[in-house]
Amino acid sequence: MLDIPPEEFEDLVAEALDEIPDELARLVENVVFVVEDDSDDERGTLLGLYEGVPLTERGQWYAGAMPDRITIYRRPILAICRTLDDVVDEVHVTVVHEIAHHFGIDDDRLHELGYD
């Protein structure tokens, strides 16, 4: 398994966020991005997780809500990648995948779009 220190991995996540088109990035509201080593997923295969209320489900009651949370899991991503380029690609796909959930796009639609 590749070993990329947490700080460097966080930089890769930040770079993936910087690659999100400005038109979409401006629409991301009330979200905090976090990098953790591992998830609570028993299989250890969860690469990222969106927790919150998608934009498509927010109504007037949403005002003052705590931020949504997007977590990117470092070790599971490193476990499936063979090279640094693979890690960069997987981080990008995972970040886009979780942001898509924020926009209300479900896993079936993401699969159709090629973001498994």
Image (spheres, rainbow, N blue to C red):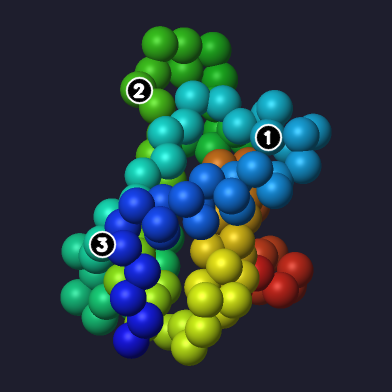
Pointers 1 and 2 in contact (C-beta within 8 Å): no
Please state if 113 lies on the left or on the right of 100 as rendered.
right
Side of 63 where 57 appears, left or right? right
Asked whether the residues under the numbered discs 3 and 1 touch, taking CB atoms below 8 Å apart as contact, a structural biologist would say no
Q: Residue 57 or 77: which is nearer the viewer?
A: 77
Residue 101 in sight from this viewpoint: no
Q: Residues within 10 Å of mark 2 (few under 14, many from 20)?
A: few
Kind of residue indicated by mark 1: Ala
Say if 54 sits above or below 97 in the image: above
Q: Could you tell me which secondary element the residue under label 3 belongs to? A: loop
Give the residue displayed 75% in from the left and 68% down from the top: 113
Q: Nearer the viewer, mark 3 or mark 2?
A: 3
Q: What's the mark number on residue 25?
A: 1
Residue 37, disc: 3
x, y (%) of residue 12? 51, 56
Q: Which mark is residue 66?
A: 2
Of the residues under marks 1 and 2, which one precedes in the sequence?
Answer: 1
Look at the image and tell me in which quarter the N terminus lies. Answer: bottom left
- Closer to viewer: mark 3 or mark 1: 3
Q: Residue at x 49, y 25 (%)?
A: 30
Residue 52 in the image: above or below residue 59: below
Q: Quadrant of residue 75?
A: bottom left
Percent x, y of residue 114? 71, 74
